[in-house]
Amino acid sequence: MFIIEEHIYFWGFLVLPVLLLLFLSYVYWKKKTQKKFAEVRLFKKLAPEQSSFKSNLKFIVLSLGFACFVLALVNPKLGTKLETVKREGVDIVFALDVSKSMLAEDIAPNRLEKSKRIITEIINNLTSDRVGLVGYAGSAFPQVPITTDYASTKTFLQSMNTDMVSSQGTAISQALDLARSYYNDDDQTNKVLVILSEGEDHDGNAESMAEQAAEEGIRIYTIGVGTERGDPIPIRSDGRIQSYLKNDAGETVITKKDTETLQRIAEIGNGSYIDGASTSKAVDEILGELQKIEKTEFEAKQFADFKSKYQWFLGFGIFLVLFDILLLERKTAWIRRLNLFNERTKDED
C-alpha cells in the first residue's frame, strides 16, 4: 500500500502541456525560419548532421525528467510492514440509494450528491470505527466491505452513480438483506446500518427485513434526503436538462420523500430518523448517536512503517536532465549508417 504526502504538487503536471505548446511553437518557428533561409533539400545539404529526431527526443527526455521531479515533490510513501493492531469501535455500514429518483434537485445540488456529502463528513469525523458501503436501487450491490481504510471508502463513494444498477426502483429491503451479510459475528462488534434515501419503498418488504436485522443486533438509522413536496427527475445531456422522466402514461414523475417509511424502519431497527436537509446537522446527530453506542475491541490489519520513495524519482529525474544535456542534436554515426529513421538522402547514396 502507498500513500501520497503532498497532493498539492500534482498541480505541477499542468506545466507539461505548457512545455509541449512552447516546444511545438518553437518547431513551427524553426521550420518557418529555415524555409526563409533555404529550401528543405538544400538545407539538408548545408546541415547534414542536423537530426530532427534527436530534437524531439531531447524534449521527451526533458519532460520525463520534469515529471519525475513532480513525483518526487508529492513524496509517495510505501507501506513496508503489515501489522495487526487492537482498536475499539463499531461497524458502520452505509446503504446509499442510487435510484434515478436520487437525481431530483429539491435539495441542492441533488439528493445523491447531498447523501455523498453527509457520508463523507461522517467518515471524516470517525477515528477507529470500521465502515462499509452498499449501493441499491431495484437491487443491492456491495461497494466496499467492512474496512478501516477511510480514504478508499470515500474514493469508491464518489464513483457511485445512478447507472450502476440496471434494475430501477427503490428496494430498501434489498439493501437491508445485503447489509446483514457485511458484519462479522466472530468479532462481536456493535452493528450500525445507516440508510440514506428519499424513502420510497417499491417492494414493500423493508419493514419485515428491518425486523430481521434488528433481531441480529443491527441498529438502523435512516437519513431522509429530499422534500415531501417532491420534484421531477431531470434527464441531462451534456450537463443540461433536456427533459424530465415520465411514466408510461406520459406524465412527469414527481418523486417525494417518504418520511413515515424511513421513521418506521428506524423505529423497528432501534435507531432514529434524521432529516438530511442540513449536512452539518445530520452529521452532528448521527455522530451523537454513535457516541452513545458502546465501543467493542477488535483486531485490524494495517500497514506501518511507511517509507518515502521520492529518492527514486529525484535520482531518475536528475539522470534524465543530465542525459538531455549530453544528448546532442547531431546525427549519431552508427545510427546514421543503419538508416533507421530514413534520414539519408538520395544524394548520399
Image (cartoon, rainbow, N blue to C red):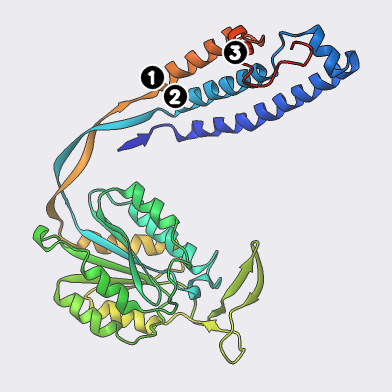
Residue under label 1: 311
Secondary element at image label 2? helix
Position of residue 252 relative to residue 3, above or below, is below
Tell me the kind of residue under disc 1.
Gln
| Amino acid bearing label 3 | Ile
- Of marks 3 and 2, the one in the foreground: 3
Mark closest to the chain's N terminus, 1 or 3: 1
Residue 342 in view: yes
Q: Which residue is mark 2?
A: 72
Q: Position of residue 11 (x, y in %)?
A: 55, 34
| Crowding at mark 3 (Cα within 10 Å: few <14, some 14-19, many 20+) | few
Q: Earlier in the sequence, mark 2 or mark 1?
A: 2
Q: Where is mark 3, residue-wise?
A: 335
Residue type highlighted by circle 2: Ala
Left or right, 69 with respect to 244, comes to: left
Q: Residue at x 28, y 61 (%)?
A: 288
Task: Report if the CB atoms under discs 2 and 1 are less than 8 Å apart.
Answer: yes
